[in-house]
Image: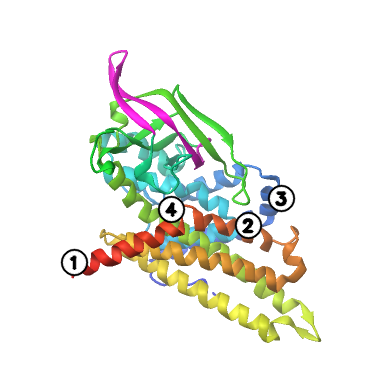
Amino acid sequence: MSLLESMDGLSPEEAEFVEVVAKWVDREVRPVVRQLEQDDVYPAALIDSMKDIGIFGLAIGEPWGSGSVSGRAYARITEEIARGWMSLAGAFGGHSVVSKLLTKHGTSEQQDRYLPSMSTGAIRATMALTEPDGGSDLQAIRTTATRSTRDGVDGYVINGAKTWITNSRMSDVVALLCVTDMSAEPRHKGISILLVEKVPGFTVGRNLPKLGYRGVESCELSFEDCFVPSDALLGGVEGQGFVQMMGGLEIGRIQVAARAIGVARAAFDDALAYAQQRESFGQPIWKHQSVGNLLADMATQITAGQRLNYHAADRYDTGVRADLEAGMAKLFCSEMAAKVTLDAIRIHGGHGYSTEFDVERFYRDAPLMIVGEGTNEIQRNVIARQLVERRRQQ
């Protein structure tokens, strides 16, 4: 086991799970990913394998499933999957956030309705936050849900649009962030989460073209007089959605950081192997100081990112607020992955620019972690605000 594959802090069962996933990645994912990615083909067979392994139940424990693992194990498993193909890690990222939202905030009826099937992947879920004009400012969302009665059923009529919603076409339920009280002050107190299934008035639009992160769909969603019953309100109480989602995004940002680590590890592994095989001026290129220094920095930065993310995951597991730590991990690891993947191309030279080598894919996938799950500019705001708030509490 290499320096970059530590099992520290995992239970024996969790370590075994990570090993199973790592072997599956090497055996089933890496041999096929290049062609799937270049063709932008939905990886149905690999998704089915992930269901069989238990990936979709990682955030769901008893009594609805038996696959719940610690935050650190969740991060490690995400790393391994992203090391094979980052898109596969994205295929269960939003699903896991919704799982945590239901586990922590859902009514008993909502939990019993969704979680058993979500734990096996029979029902897949995602979250819908971003709007065409809103970006990372979630308090500025315009999608509304107005109280109404239809055919004698109390519920909500939804109108609005979302964009860049990953897995929306393949998911069965969407955790929709929307405004249920336009007059609420402060504004976030009027925001709720509705669990929306594929009902009339809910349309999944086109698959958005992307630089990387191919294979899984990111779509535009529209809601036009879309009616859902009142029991679709997460937790049954209006005005809690913003706080609920901010807590859910803590594990989401830990997962994004883990994706970045996985991509960086894959780029480093390829660069290290190439630097030992490729020769120039009569010696392997790793012996040239400029290349050796790149490798040394890459390994150091990946290891630092891992430790930062594991710290965030450990704090998350204690149940205390972890948005500062998760934000730091997401910020550092995503920026680190962008640098490491570019350095891997430098080490490969001209070959790094060829689609016959995987490092160009790693380089294209890395920017998603910078702009996804809240841009890094937003992460810095979150970190600064939390630093001040925690100092005040001392």
SS type, badge 2: helix
SS type, badge 4: loop
Give the residue pinned by disc 3: 35
Q: Residue type at mark 2: give it.
A: Arg
SS type, badge 3: helix
Q: Which residues are magenta?
A: 143-170
Residue 362 drawn at (x, y percent): 62, 60
Residue 335 drawn at (x, y percent): 51, 65
Mark 3–mark 2 Cα distance, whole angstroms, equals: 15 Å
Mark 1–mark 3 Cα distance, whole angstroms, equals: 53 Å
Q: Earlier in the sequence, mark 1 or mark 3?
A: 3
Mark number, residue 393: 1
In front of the other: 324 or 122: 324
SS type, badge 1: helix
Front label number (1 vs 3): 1
Mark 4–mark 3 Cα distance, whole angstroms, equals: 30 Å
Give the residue pinned by disc 2: 364
Circle 2 packing at 10 Å, graded few (<14), some (14-19), many (20+), is some
Q: Residue 206's quadrant in the figure? A: top right
Q: Earlier in the sequence, mark 4 or mark 3?
A: 3
Q: What residue appears at the point 33 percent right and 46 percent down from the top-left corner?
A: 245
Q: What residue appears at the point 66 percent right and 72 percent down from the top-left corner?
A: 271
Q: What residue appears at the point 63 percent right and 67 percent down from the top-left corner?
A: 342
Q: Residue type at mark 4: give it.
A: Gly
Circle 1 packing at 10 Å, graded few (<14), some (14-19), many (20+), is few
Give the residue pinned by disc 4: 374
Residue 104 drawn at (x, y percent): 28, 47
Residue 80 drawn at (x, y percent): 53, 61
Q: Residue type at mark 1: give it.
A: Gln
